[in-house]
Amino acid sequence: MINVLNINHAFGDNQALTDISFDVQAGEIFGLIGPDGAGKTTLFRILATLLLPGSGSATLNGLDVVRDYKTLRTRIGYMPGRFSLYQDLTVDENLQFFASVFGVTVEENRHLINDIYVQLEPFKNRRAGALSGGMKQKLALCCALIHKPQILMLDEPGTGVDPVSRREFWDMLRRLRDGGLTILVSTPYMDEAAWCNRVALVQQGHIMAIDTPEALTAAFPKKLFAVRAVDKYRLINDLRSMETGANAYAFGEFAHFASPSAKIQVADVELFLQKKGHNGVEVKEAEPTVEDCFIDLMTDDSQQSTVDSPPGEITLK
Amino acid sequence: MRTVFFLVQKEFLQIIRNRTMLPVMLVMPVVQTLLLSFAANYEIKNLALCVVDHDLSPMSRQLVGKFTGSGYFKLSESTFSRSEADVSLARERSDMILEIPPDFERNFMREGKTGISLTANAINASKAGLGMGYAGNIVRDFSSTISTTSGAAPGARINMTYSNWYNPKLDYKAFMVPGILGEIVALIICFLTALNLVREREMGTMEQLNVTPVKKWQFILGKLLPFWALAMVMMAVGLTVGWLVFRIPMVGSLWLVFAYTLFFAPAMLGIGFLISNFSETQQQAMFTAWFFLLIFILMCGLFTPVDSMPQWAQWLNMLNPVQYFVAFMRQVLLKGATFADVQQNFYSVLTYATVVNGLAVWTYRKRN
């Protein structure tokens, strides 16, 4: 459904995208996962026919993003990362307006958005600018769907939305996918990867890996422990020095410790930490998540180390 | 065309929703015409006059009386020392010094010739200039009456007669209000168009619109039509105020005025549109618009006559759309010019609008 081949794009000297290639199958949710500044939005703008790629090509449902952009615009639904509807128009006015510029009426396509619209209906005469974050997202989704697109593109839909609304929103996306829609979504939240059929991990304009979330975590090449101690900062530094190639980073209330050697056991880590004089040590084996995979790939990639990343967010230091 | 209709409809919805836009558009013409024509005018009254009368003759007193009785001058000080008068001028207690020499009356009677000295504080050059002009008239007037009534030395005198065409009473308001109307309409629609377009970019709605099949010309027309209509409404409001409050003459055809506005408005809309293409934020657009509009307004002939500008400035002024409007309004409203008289102006504005909008459409990009 979506074929991206060797896309490169630079803003001046800043190489935003390097050799991006991937395919999205019809009827799947494909996630582009990566931190802010990874190039996700640039890629989205190219695929939404808003930005001409520096080089490379992309087709959506057989339509080229450069050559066939006019036809393509009627086939895709694009929801930018920032809320981009008219804040001074009401919910219904926005919906009517976007339907009319696509040459359709809300009535004829009501069935496409009915699930979502019922939640918006109580606020239908409220101005879009006065809606909550979650409601804004739902309205934007309705407006992106009203012309019956074949492909839905959502740039960071989870940003600025509370966890409950975020979950609801993903439920809607899954229902839309089950209805046959192809969905391309980008997100900086690693936990959202689990909702996608397949994900591409993006970092500094490169795709580091493409696979299903399950396959990615199954292929995690290191042994992972969740470790806790009183002095977290010293704990992370000590864990890093335990062996070469080991990595440690904050992960919620624990620190995750990824060791390259398969032989190492919980007891070894405990012993090491006790020798270092840590108090309140707790060590257990942990199942790798997409975030662990991402950090592992990222450290391999750039030899940069990560400290203090709260769950679901990557912070580079 | 249906799409354009929906775009225009949306635009009007937004204009009506906007809490400041409509009031500003309707109140601004009224306030500006009232303020500019009542308060900020060129008529100078009550210039403070310091008199140094060394003669103290009946004739010198008569002259001073002429000055104070004219309404343009009021006596601020009277002294016998020139240096005191200079201090008064320096301290800004007086705007002008009238010094009458000791033998003022005697010289006039004997030789038919005498002199006085006028010194003005020219920090404000236009005030000084006008004051001098008034004073000159008073003195001329005075000398002619004196020579006829006193029967002294009948010297050669020039009798001047005045006649001001199209504005017989030199009514400042009749002269200013039509010009101000043109200036305000030009200013507001140029600003609004620029800000409105940049706002779409700033709010991200432009991006959302760009992925729709809305075509470039549809989008542009959808933006220009509402403001075009508003320009006509503002013109009507302004003319009504001008007529009700100032009783400005409307010698020419009002239809012609509206027809001209219909052609002129796109020129200003196009400038606003062009500015928006090169601005990322409303603030940038605001500054750029100010830069141009300030020059346009100062050079438009509203405050200083275009004819007295140096030749290069007059050439440059051909790029100033407001100048055409102001000239047109005065010609039609005061002088009763017909289409045949102002057609050159029509064509200039039409060309201007075409070029500016062409440039704007050309530089507008739906994608980068």
Image (tube, rainbow, N blue to C red):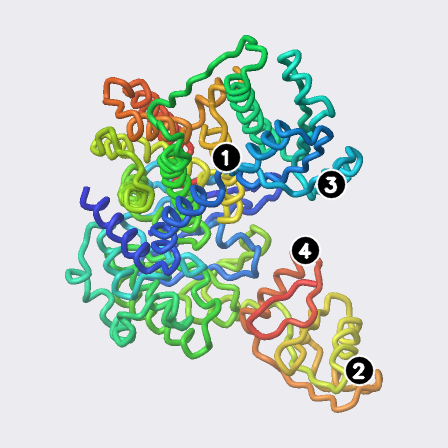
Task: Identify the amino acid type marked 3.
Answer: Ser
Q: Which residue is mark 4?
A: A302
Q: Which residue is mark 3?
A: B88
SS for dot 1? helix
- Asked whether the residues under the numbered discs 2 and 3 touch, taking CB atoms below 8 Å apart as contact, a structural biologist would say no
Residue drawn at x 50%, y 35% as measured from the top left: B292
- Of labels 3 and 1, the one closer to you: 3
Q: Nearer the viewer, residue A165 or A133?
A: A133
Letter of the chain that mark 4 sits on in the rendering? A
Task: Identify the amino acid type marked 2.
Answer: Phe
- Asked whether the residues under the numbered discs 3 and 4 touch, taking CB atoms below 8 Å apart as contact, a structural biologist would say no
Alpha carbon separation for disc pair 3 and 1: 42 Å
Q: Which residue is mark 2?
A: A272
Res. B5 mark: none
Horizontal side, residue A169 vs residue B262: left or right: right
- Of labels 2 and 3, the one closer to you: 3
- Of labels 2 and 1, the one closer to you: 1
